[in-house]
Image: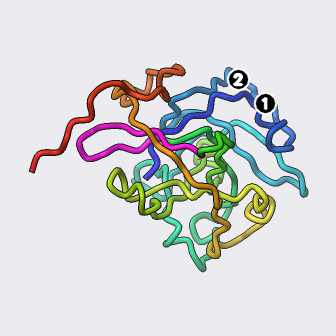
Amino acid sequence: MCGRYSMPLSLVELARLLEAQYIKPQSSFKVGYNIAPSREAPLMTLEQGRRVLKPAHWGLSVGQGVKQCINLRAEKLSGKSFSSRNPAARPCVAPAQGFYEWEKSGQAHYFYFKSAALLCMAALCWPRADGVLGFAIITTRMPDAWTHIHERSPLLLAPDALNDWLSRDSGGDWPFAPEPIASHPVSRAVNKPDFDSPDCIARSLEPVQAQLF
């Protein structure tokens, strides 16, 4: 799963990098290095053929009495209409500089492109019961080199396939980014949602404890 990610760039900076327009937030909007579920974050959709960035809340309600959904498995979306999840569901992109995953030992790791390029995470969005736009990140199998840390990863999209993805109405034949990812351990303080600074993504000098069997 993907339970935290880093996106410290402003909507203005993101709009330039993604060649998109942006909608100015109506309330205080804070980007950061430790975005957690239920927090507001930048989201990109396609509106009348144009890329548009807007604030949205990470998390969706998928049914009565069902707790907040933050991830959707790509395998369960393949070959299915997005409207099968919700009549108003549509594809979107959650941009990130990197994402975090945890070993079973509790050690956090930060994942990012070796080139430091922006990550474009595939997602679905729709208005929640309270009228606020929510989204969930689509996940897939982690590359084999990193499955010892975690088995799932956000589905990272190829930069030249963003418009194709944003105009789809069903899953499958995913346009994966070909670029390899890198990783390093980070401070366990990342576990705390209110810990939000550049220190979140700094390589940890703490010794990584071996698992005991």
Q: Which mark is residue 59?
A: none
Q: In the rendered image, is residue 132 in sight?
A: no
**Residue to which mark 2 is pinned:** 27
* Amino acid type at mark 2: Ser
Name the foreground residue: 83 vs 119: 119
Name the foreground residue: 188 vs 114: 114
Q: Is residue 64 above or below residue 109?
A: below
At 78% from the left edge and 65% from the top edge, which residue is drawn? 164
Q: Is residue 175 above or below residue 145?
A: below
- Alpha-carbon neighbours of circle 2 within 10 Å: few (<14), some, or many (≥20)? few
Label 1 vs 2, first from the N-terminus: 1
**Residue to which mark 1 is pinned:** 13
Name the foreground residue: 35 vs 136: 35
- Alpha-carbon neighbours of circle 1 within 10 Å: few (<14), some, or many (≥20)? few
Task: Examine the residues drawn in magenta and state their main secondary structure.
Answer: strand
Q: Which residues are magenta?
A: 100-113
- Furthest toward the left, the residue is 213
* Amino acid type at mark 1: Glu
Q: Is residue 167 above or below residue 7?
A: below
- Could you tell me residue 55's position as x and y percent? 69, 36
Element marked by disc 1: helix
Element marked by disc 2: loop
At 36% from the left edge and 53% from the top edge, which residue is drawn? 150
Name the foreground residue: 36 vs 162: 162
Q: In the rendered image, is residue 163 in sight?
A: yes
